[in-house]
Image: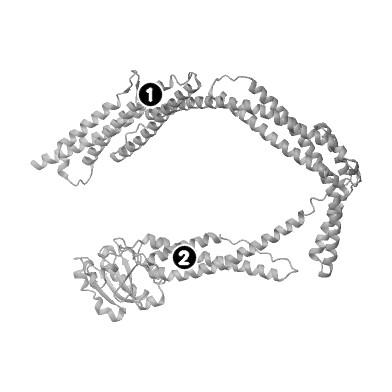
């Protein structure tokens, strides 16, 4: 039986195994009866589940059952004891019925358990809770029976659910992995057949199941030794000790099958990669034909010339497209024959495939070499043209003096300057790389000359490439020197305006916090507890505002330092400091007012709640007239304070909240004052009746 099926019943704690043992080392089964009527069917289900947990060896030592009848009726206790005869007669050695101190004496005479010992099969004794230690050691009793044994039913139930879930999932996963691993091995043994079709992925994640098992095992092992620290600890349950070997065995089997499964996945992935490589191995081939290439050697001296040569080369490549298609189709057919052919055909097929690949490789290499050469030449000329335009733009930007207008403009100008310089540096590096690649390709062009000397034809191209790179290097160096001077000044300007903007932002944030304090955080709480919570939140709110104010002050100090360095006057920070101080002063005044109101609200609600409580611990306190007068005085003061606005140093006034908000708060205070007054009247009437 799974715990999940009867989970609602188990949560009721109709019976439990606390882990305690009697003097015969038998487990103690506790049945705590309560005032409500106990369902015998549910109790029977609970006992069946609990008694199925311990091992047969543990059951052979017998159980001591504690029936806690202190909160139940005698007939219910008698029914439970008789039910034990049918549920676990051979496994119960002793039943201790914990009786109340004075309610069963007459009823016990009608039914003596000791006379029924032979019929029941176990001994039943009636004992008070304080005398239960005569039969069971105090360290084996839970706290409700005066013992020191700790037992947490919810914790035990949660661990039991985890154990059963892990057992179920791991067993199912082991079956799935076994089917997968055995199926793959059978398919691998049949070389000429395709692998068997089956679901290759398990229904649950093995890593998750393994992690759950390790966590469960760690928890069980920790409970095994949790009494070694010298403190009061929950003794390890027998079912948990028995669960350790089972969990370890499942984990070992699961790790073994999962290791095999990972190896299967690795082999399958490797085989898939090999198949993909085999499909892509011919994509670089471009077809036969080399005669048209013998007359094409130039690379051009500009973008337009390179584009014209590329267009001519594309016409040559289009003449070979049919050959490419024929070769690809033929290679696919050969690969299919290799996969399905006999051993005597493999050598011949591989030889034919290699021969075709060699021919196509020579043809495709010539086309690819020419195509790459022209593409590199076009890229070199494009980079050189872009580089020249970038240098012209950068030089023009540096020749114009930039006057500071605002922080964003200076920052944008600096960003643009840095981007241009970075682009120029990247462009020059790209130009060098393209030029070197192009020079290397031109040098290697003699390999495809078929005996023709092309060094004379390439001399002009080599000189042109080297001259372009040297000219760009000189222009770039001149611009870098000018950029260094401009950058230093603009960085200081950016920092200046950034500090001014952030300081203004700090003032705005502080103003928003003040606005929130005036319109949003206005509640005083409906009781003392809520008022204390609101006061604590308000203090955290004030800490945020204090940090914002300090941040603004630091920014304004940095602005002064930067202005002195740049020898300029800050245009935006002159009025920022007065505004910051003004808003902060208004915030502190408003915050102090809210603190006063919250403290008054706490005092009012605390005294009123003490008076209005239904069962006071000290009734004489309620008769104290000073408390009623204090509630009335504090309530009136709080009502008066709600109508008073906050007055700032400049003479302006602000109310905390809208009139409707203040009316709602005032109405709640008046209502509680009315209840206090009514209670006072009731007590006065009661005193008058008593005196009369």
- Disc nearer the start of the sequence (1/2): 2
Dot 2: within a 10 Å radius of its alpha carbon, few (fewer than 14), some, or many (20 or more) residues? Answer: some
Q: Is residue 455 left or right of residue 427?
A: right
Which residue corresponds to the image point at 51% horizontal and 27% vertical from the top-left? Answer: 495
Report the mark closest to the observer, 1 or 2: 1
In the rendered image, residue 199, in percent from the top left (x then y), is placed at 64, 62
Residue nearest the viewer, comparing 352 with 393: 393
Which mark identifies residue 164?
A: 2
Which residue corresponds to the image point at 86% horizontal and 57% vertical from the top-left? Answer: 356
In the rendered image, residue 77, in percent from the top left (x then y), is placed at 28, 69
Which residue corresponds to the image point at 54% horizontal and 69% vertical from the top-left? Answer: 253
Could you tell me if residue 5 is visible in this image? Answer: no
Q: Quadrant of residue 338?
A: bottom right
Which residue corresponds to the image point at 25% horizontal and 64% vertical from the top-left? Answer: 146
Residue holding disc 1: 581
Give the SS element for disc 1.
helix
Residue nearest the viewer, comparing 505 with 289: 289
Q: Is residue 491 left or right of residue 134?
A: right
In the rendered image, residue 90, in percent from the top left (x then y), is placed at 35, 79
């Amino acid at each position: 039986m799974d715990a999940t099926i009867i989970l609602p019943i188990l949560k009721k704690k109709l019976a439990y195994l606390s882990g305690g043992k009697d003097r015969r080392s038998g487990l103690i089964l506790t049945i705590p009866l309560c005032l409500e009527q106990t369902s015998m069917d549910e109790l029977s289900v609970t006992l069946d589940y609990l008694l199925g947990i311990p091992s047969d060896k543990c059951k052979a030592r017998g159980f001591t059952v504690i029936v806690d009848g202190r909160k139940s009726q005698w007939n219910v206790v008698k029914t439970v004891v008789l039910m034990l005869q049918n549920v676990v007669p051979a496994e119960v050695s002793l039943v201790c019925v914990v009786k109340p101190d004075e309610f069963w004496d007459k009823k016990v005479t009608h039914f003596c358990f000791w006379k029924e010992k032979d019929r029941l099969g176990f001994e039943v004794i009636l004992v008070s809770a304080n005398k239960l230690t005569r039969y069971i050691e105090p360290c084996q009793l839970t706290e409700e029976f005066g013992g020191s044994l700790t037992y947490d039913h919810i914790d035990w139930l949660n661990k039991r659910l985890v154990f059963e879930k892990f057992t179920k999932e791991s067993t199912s996963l082991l079956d799935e992995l076994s089917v997968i691993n055995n199926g793959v091995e059978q398919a691998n043994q049949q070389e000429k057949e395709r692998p068997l079709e089956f679901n290759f992925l398990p229904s649950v994640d093995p890593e998750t199941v393994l992690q759950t098992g390790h966590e469960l095992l760690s928890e069980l092992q920790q409970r095994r030794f949790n009494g070694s620290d010298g403190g009061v600890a929950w003794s390890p349950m027998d079912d948990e000790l028995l669960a350790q070997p089972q969990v370890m065995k499942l984990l070992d089997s699961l790790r073994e099958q999962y290791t095999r499964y990972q190896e299967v996945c690795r082999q399958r992935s490797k085989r898939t990669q090999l198949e993909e490589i085999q499909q892509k191995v011919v994509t670089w081939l471009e077809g036969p034909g080399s005669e048209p290439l013998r007359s094409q050697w130039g690379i051009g001296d500009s973008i337009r010339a390179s584009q014209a040569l590329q267009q001519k080369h594309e016409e040559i490549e289009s003449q070979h497209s049919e050959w490419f298609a024929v070769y690809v189709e033929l290679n696919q057919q050969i690969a299919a024959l290799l996969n399905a052919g006999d051993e005597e055909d493999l050598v011949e097929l591989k030889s034919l495939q290699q021969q075709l690949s060699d021919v196509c490789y020579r043809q495709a290499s010539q086309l690819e070499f020419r195509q790459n050469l022209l593409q590199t030449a076009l890229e070199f000329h494009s980079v050189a043209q872009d580089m020249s335009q970038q240098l012209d733009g950068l030089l023009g930007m540096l020749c114009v003096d930039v006057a500071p207008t605002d922080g964003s403009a200076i920052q944008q100008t600096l960003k643009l300057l840095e981007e241009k310089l970075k682009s120029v540096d990247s462009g020059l590096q790209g130009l060098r790389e393209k030029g070197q690649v192009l020079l290397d390709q031109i040098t290697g062009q003699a390999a495809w000359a078929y005996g023709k000397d092309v060094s004379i034809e390439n001399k002009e191209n080599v000189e042109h490439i080297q001259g372009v790179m040297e000219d760009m290097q000189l222009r770039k160096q001149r611009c870098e020197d000018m950029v260094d001077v401009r950058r230093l000044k603009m960085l200081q300007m950016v920092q200046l305006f950034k500090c001014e903007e952030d300081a203004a932002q700090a003032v705005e944030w502080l103003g928003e916090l003040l606005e929130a304090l005036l319109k949003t955080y206005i509640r005083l709480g409906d009781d003392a507890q809520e008022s204390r919570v609101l006061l604590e939140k308000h203090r955290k709110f004030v800490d945020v505002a204090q940090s914002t104010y300090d941040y603004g002050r630091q920014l304004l100090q940095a602005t002064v330092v930067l202005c002195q360095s740049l020898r300029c006057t800050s245009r935006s920070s002159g009025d920022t400091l007065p505004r910051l101080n003004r808003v902060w002063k208004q915030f502190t005044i408003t915050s102090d007012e809210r603190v006063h109101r919250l403290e008054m609200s706490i005092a009012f609600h605390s005294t009123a709640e003490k008076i209005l409580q239904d069962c006071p611990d000290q009734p004489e306190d309620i008769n104290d007239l000073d408390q009623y007068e204090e509630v009335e005085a504090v309530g009136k003061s709080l009502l008066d304070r709600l109508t008073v606005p906050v007055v700032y140093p400049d003479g302006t006034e602000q109310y905390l909240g809208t009139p409707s908000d203040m009316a709602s708060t005032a109405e709640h205070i008046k209502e509680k004052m009315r209840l206090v007054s009514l209670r006072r009247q009731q007590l006065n009437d009661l005193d008058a009746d008593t005196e009369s």
